[in-house]
C-alpha cells in the first residue's frame, strides 16, 4: 500500500481573543506585562493519522472537535504549529460549496475560474466542460450569472466542477446536506464511483448514515484529540452512544 | 498544488512564492479577467470610466496648477513649463497606475479571505493580479496620452520609448513589492490599508508630477535632492517625462542630471529590493493567513 496522507503528531493553537488596540497594549505594558494579551486554545493536539491510497475515511466528531481544522491542514490551507503533514498527489476538495464562485460572473465563467482555483489546467477545463455542465443539470442557465441561481443550482454546479478536477486525494467538508434527493443520490453515486476508482477520500460530515455508506474507516476527534480510529461501524456506534 | 501524481510525499501549503505564479498562469489570467468584468458591472459608462476619471482629474489639475498657479508657460509667464498639459498628464497616468495597483493589492488578501481560508492556492496571485488589472486600466490612459503627444508634435526616438518602458517596469515592480508587503500586513492589522492610502497621497506629491524637478533642487540643496531622486516613483515619472513630454518640446528643457547613468539603475535596484522584501515578508506571514482572516 502507498501512503496518500501522513499526518504525524500535529498540534494547532488558536488565539481566542485578539488584542489589537493600542490602548489595551499600553495598559498591558503599564501594568508590567501581567497576564497574557491573548488567550489560546488547542484546536488539534498531537493528532496522527495515516491514510493509504484508495482508502475512504470519515472524520467524525461533535461541533468544534477539530475535524475541519484537520482537513484544512491536509489541504495546506493551514500549517501546523508542530508536527508534519505530508500528502502524495494532487489534493483538491470541496471545503465549502462554491468557495471561489463569483456571483456576478456567469456559470460558464465560474466553471473556468473554479476549475483553475482547484488546480485544473486550461485544457482540462475545456475538455471536461461539457461533462461538468451535463452532470450539474444546469443546462441553458450556464450563461446566466450565478447570483440568479437557486441555492440548489449553485451547489450542483460547484459540486460538479469539484468532482471533475480528478485529484488523487479528494477532501469533502459537509456539502452533501444540500441539494434535492435525486441530486444527492447522484452525488453519492459519483463519490462511490471515485472510491471504486481508487481515489482517496476524506469526508467530514455529521450525517452518520451517509458516511457509513461511503466510508470504510472512521476517525473520531474530540476537543482536538484523536479518540478513535478504526472501522466506520464502530466509530459511528461510539458517536451514537 | 504543483505536486506530481506519482511523486513523493510532499508538505502541502508550502508555496514557492512568486515562482508559483508562472505555473498558475491560467488562474492568474482568469482572476484578472474576473476583476475586469466585475469592476464596472451595472454601470452605463463601463470601461469608459477608465477614461473619464483621469480626464477630469487632469482638467482640474491643469486649471488649478497650470493656469492659476502659473506652471504653464505663456506669453506672460515665460518661466513656466512648455507643454505643461503633456508634462502633467504623462506623470498622472503613471501615478494613477501606481495608486490603483498598490491600493488594490494591499486589500487583495483580505478581500479574497473567503477563498484563502478554504482552498490552498499560491496567495501571491491576488496582489499580482491586482497589479495586472491596473496595468490593463493604465492602457487606455496611455492611448490618450499618446494621442495628446502626437497633437503636441511628439517625435520620440527608440531610447525615449525604452525609457517609458523602464519607468513602467520600475513602478510596476515597486507596486508589486509594496502590495505583497502591505497586503500581508493587512491581514493582521487593518491599519495597513489606511497607511497605504496615506502613502499614496504623499507619493503623488513626492514626485515631480505637478511641478518641475528643478524647483525641488533649488529649495532642497544637493544632498536632500539626491534622496528625493532615489525614490523609484520619481525616477519613473522622470523617465515618462523624458519619453512623452521632452520630445514635444524644443529640447531646451533640462532633464535631471545622470538620469540614465545613475538614477535608472538605482530605480531598478530599489524596485528589485522592494520586491524581494515584500516576498520575504509575505512568505513569513502567509502561514497564518487562514486563521487570522
Image: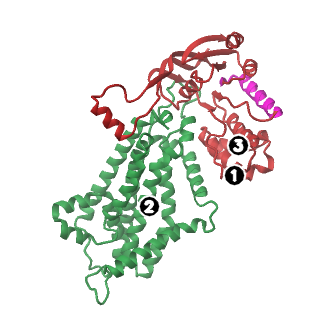
Chain colours: A red, B green
SS for callout 1: loop
Q: Does the magenta stretch include residue A199?
A: yes
Q: Going by the picture, which residue comes out furthest to the bottom?
A: B75
For the residue labelled by badge 2, is the local secondary structure a helix, a strand or a loop? helix
Foreground residue among A185 and A64: A64
Q: Mark 1 points at which residue?
A: A106
Would you say residue B83 is visible in this rendering? no
Label 2 crowd (10 A; few <14 / some 14-19 / many >=20): many
Viewer-closest of B23 and A92: A92
The residue indicated by pointer 3 is A127
Could you tell me which residue is drawn at 30 percent across and 72 percent down? B211
Whether residue A92 sits left or right of residue B190 in the image: it is right
From the viewer's perspective, is the residue at label 3 or at label 1 nearer?
A: 1
The residues bearing labels 2 and 3 have C-alpha atoms spaced at a distance of 37 Å
Q: In this view, does B145 lie above or below B43?
A: below
Image-quadrant location for residue A216 = top right
Residue located at (29% from left, 58% from top):
B231
Whether tag 2 and tag 3 are in contact, CB under 8 A, the answer is: no
Label 3, label 1: how far apart the Cα atoms are = 19 Å
Amino acid at each position: 500500500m502507498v501512503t496518500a496522507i501522513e499526518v504525524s503528531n500535529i498540534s494547532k493553537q488558536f488565539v481566542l481573543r485578539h488584542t489589537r488596540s493600542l490602548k489595551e497594549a499600553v495598559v498591558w505594558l503599564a501594568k508590567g506585562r501581567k497576564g497574557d494579551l491573548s488567550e489560546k486554545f488547542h484546536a488539534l493536539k498531537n493528532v496522527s493519522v495515516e491514510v493509504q491510497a484508495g482508502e475512504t475515511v470519515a472524520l467524525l466528531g461533535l461541533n468544534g472537535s477539530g475535524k475541519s481544522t484537520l482537513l484544512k491542514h491536509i489541504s495546506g490551507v493551514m500549517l501546523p504549529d508542530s508536527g508534519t503533514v505530508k500528502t502524495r498527489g494532487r489534493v483538491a476538495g470541496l471545503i465549502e460549496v462554491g468557495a471561489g464562485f463569483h456571483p456576478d460572473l456567469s456559470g460558464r465563467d465560474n466553471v473556468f475560474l473554479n476549475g483553475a482555483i482547484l488546480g485544473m489546467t486550461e485544457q482540462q477545463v475545456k475538455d471536461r466542460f461539457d461533462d461538468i455542465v451535463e452532470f450539474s443539470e444546469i443546462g441553458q442557465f450556464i450563461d446566466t450569472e450565478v447570483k440568479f441561481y437557486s441555492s440548489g443550482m449553485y451547489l450542483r454546479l460547484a459540486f460538479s466542477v469539484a468532482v471533475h478536477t480528478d485529484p488523487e486525494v479528494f477532501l469533502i467538508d459537509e456539502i452533501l446536506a444540500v441539494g434535492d434527493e435525486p441530486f444527492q443520490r447522484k452525488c453519492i453515486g459519483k463519490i462511490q464511483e471515485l472510491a471504486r476508482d481508487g481515489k482517496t477520500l476524506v469526508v467530514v460530515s455529521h450525517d452518520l448514515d451517509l458516511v457509513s455508506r461511503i466510508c470504510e474507516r472512521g476517525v473520531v476527534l474530540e476537543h482536538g484529540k484523536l479518540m478513535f480510529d478504526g472501522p466506520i461501524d464502530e466509530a459511528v456506534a461510539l458517536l451514537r452512544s | 498544488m504543483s505536486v506530481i501524481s506519482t511523486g513523493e510525499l510532499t508538505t502541502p501549503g508550502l508555496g514557492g512564492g512568486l515562482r508559483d505564479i508562472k505555473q498558475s498562469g491560467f488562474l492568474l489570467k482568469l482572476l484578472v479577467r474576473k476583476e475586469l468584468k466585475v469592476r464596472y458591472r451595472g454601470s452605463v459608462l463601463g470601461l469608459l470610466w477608465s477614461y473619464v476619471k483621469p480626464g477630469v482629474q487632469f482638467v482640474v489639475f491643469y486649471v488649478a496648477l497650470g493656469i492659476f498657479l502659473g506652471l504653464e508657460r505663456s506669453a506672460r509667464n515665460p518661466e513656466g513649463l512648455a507643454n505643461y498639459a503633456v508634462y502633467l498628464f504623462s506623470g498622472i497616468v503613471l501615478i494613477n497606475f501606481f495608486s490603483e495597483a498598490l491600493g488594490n493589492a494591499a486589500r487583495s488578501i483580505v478581500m479574497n479571505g473567503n477563498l484563502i481560508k478554504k482552498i490552498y492556492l499560491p496567495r501571491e496571485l491576488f496582489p499580482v493580479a491586482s497589479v495586472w488589472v491596473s496595468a490593463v486600466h493604465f492602457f487606455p490612459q496611455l492611448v490618450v496620452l499618446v494621442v495628446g503627444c502626437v497633437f503636441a508634435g511628439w517625435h520620440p526616438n527608440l531610447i525615449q520609448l525604452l525609457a517609458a518602458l523602464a519607468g513602467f517596469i520600475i513602478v510596476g515592480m515597486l507596486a508589486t513589492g509594496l502590495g505583497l508587503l502591505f497586503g500581508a500586513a493587512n491581514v493582521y492589522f487593518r491599519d495597513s490599508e489606511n497607511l497605504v492610502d496615506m502613502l499614496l497621497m504623499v507619493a503623488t506629491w513626492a514626485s515631480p508630477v505637478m511641478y518641475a524637478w528643478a524647483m525641488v533642487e533649488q529649495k532642497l540643496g544637493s544632498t536632500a535632492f539626491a534622496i528625493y531622486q532615489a525614490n523609484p516613483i520619481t525616477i519613473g515619472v522622470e523617465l515618462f517625462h523624458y519619453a512623452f513630454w521632452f520630445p514635444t518640446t524644443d529640447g531646451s528643457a533640462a532633464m535631471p542630471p545622470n538620469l540614465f547613468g545613475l538614477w535608472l539603475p538605482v530605480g531598478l535596484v530599489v524596485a528589485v529590493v522592494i520586491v524581494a522584501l515584500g516576498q520575504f515578508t509575505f512568505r513569513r506571514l502567509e502561514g497564518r493567513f487562514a486563521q487570522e482572516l
